Amino acid sequence: MTDTAKITLGDVSVDSPVLKGSVGPDVIDIRKLYAQTGAFTYDPGFTSTASCESEITYIDGDEGVLLHRGYAIGDLAEQSSFMEVCYLLLNGELPSGDELADFDNTITRHTMLHEQLATFYRGFRRDAHPMAIMCGVVGALSAFYHDSTEIHDPRQRMIASHRLIAKMPTIAAMAYKYSVGQPFVYPRNDLSYTGNFLRMTFGVPAEEYVVNPVVERALDRIFILHADHEQNASTSTVRLAGSSGANPFACIAAGIACLWGPAHGGANEAALNMLREIGRPERIPEYIARAKDKDDPFRLMGFGHRVYKNYDPRATVMQKTVREVFDALKVNDPVFEVALQLEEMALNDPYFVEKKLFPNVDFYSGVILSAIGFPTTMFTALFALARTVGWVAQWNEMISDPAQKIGRPRQLYTGPTQRAYVPVDKR
Ligand code: CMC
């Protein structure tokens, strides 16, 4: 027998079914609530609202657990590759050796961009933020790849998904090359997904670029850590945009726009800027005091999370990866010491303890990306590159769901009630 939740409003009482997931909190199905009571629910920020049913990613924020299709993020980051995680997110199961080789080959053969897009880049100013370029170029893909925009054809949906995953590194690397005034570097099929991206970003036609395997592995791991994260703001944006039937390239461009904000993907850029501004451990207490001051808008960037009320499991892997990259590249950047000490002080401060504010994925990612050589403006573009697979997996899931409808929230209206129009000469 299904559990029900009784909701009583005045004289009307309705029984709403309680749905059970495979794990996680129960969900009260209120789809008929308005028809039965004439009332809406109110939940700005969606703190108590499940917007969809999904089989892709599970988070237990209190325990600090993140699973993709049932696999723990720590195991995936340690033992798999980004290509394997992409396959898993898109198809639901880990690939066999042959399936992985086949998938890798498909992605590799979609990495080139339509040559006309190089001209498109030239429309941007050289100092454009890479995320501005990413929004524009990814949106423009729909004007170049018409043969994969019929969203009700599963094959076209998969081709669009492969194209997006494959082309994103090329698009991001070109955004970087454009900003530094260097020639675009074409992809090379004998390199891994991540090695190819490093070469397209840091290589120049004048000499051979040798991929450092420690950096390649670290960046691949960063991509794994960012691949998907349940119904976060940008993923919900992609789903909402897609719910109207918009083409996949337009939907992912919408996701990129949402990711750009400092409360979401932009936090890695903001976190490194903050660590550099702090500069030396002696100044940490001053910044902790500012973060706690209600009259100061300053927040510790890379700290706190809507869902995690425990250590973000991605931050654990990230902290370990910083050491590996610093050792391999012989980097001695004081910013890492500032980060470690800031983390320790905050985790021992009652304000952060009581509010359950822990380091999130962005706290250390900027430190690593900077050591590899990426400018801060590229950080969010890298996040977008890696999150693309999550976006397309969630978008595919939504379109394949027979219960799918256009997303259309309602509101609590508090503006003026109907009033008479007054002509301008009478006001
Ligand atoms: N520094 C200081 N105080 C904080 C911080 C912080 N980083 N984060 C939250 N708080 C306080 C906040 O002031 C509030 O206090 P009070 O209850 O007294 O008003 C309380 O903690 C709850 O915060 P909230 O803003 O209501 O929580 P939220 O779930 O709406 O916000 C957040 C989550 C991630 C936007 C927020 O923690 C934040 O702004 N963090 C800094 C930005 C950041 O690192 N973002 C990356 C998120 S992880 C990457 C991703 O998934 O995109």
Image (spheres, rainbow, N blue to C red):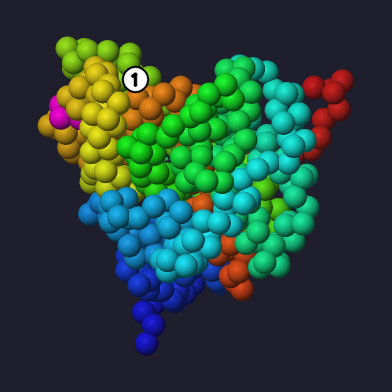
Q: Amino acid at mark 1?
A: Met
Q: Is residue 228 left or right of residue 37?
A: left
330 lies left or right of 174? left
What residue is at 81 percent from the left and 35 percent from the top?
421
- Residue that numbered label 1 is attached to: 274
Please tell me whether the stretch drawn in magenta is mainly helix, strand or loop. Answer: helix
Magenta stretch: includes residue 400? no
Residue at x 86%, y 27% (from the top left corner): 423
In the image, is residue 125 above or below residue 167? above
Q: Which residues are magenta?
A: 342-346
Q: Percent position (x, y) of residue 315?
A: 28, 40
Where's the C terminus, which quadrant? top right
Q: Quadrant of residue 305?
A: top left
Q: Position of residue 217 (x, y in %)?
A: 35, 42
The reply, left or right, for residue 111 in relation to residue 79 is: right
Work out whether residue 220 can be spotted. yes
Is 221 or 195 nearer to us in this picture? Answer: 195
Q: Is residue 414 above or below residue 376?
A: below
Measured as percent of width and height from the top left, residue 236 is found at 53, 51
Picture quarter with the N terminus: bottom left
Q: Position of residue 22 (x, y in %)?
A: 35, 72
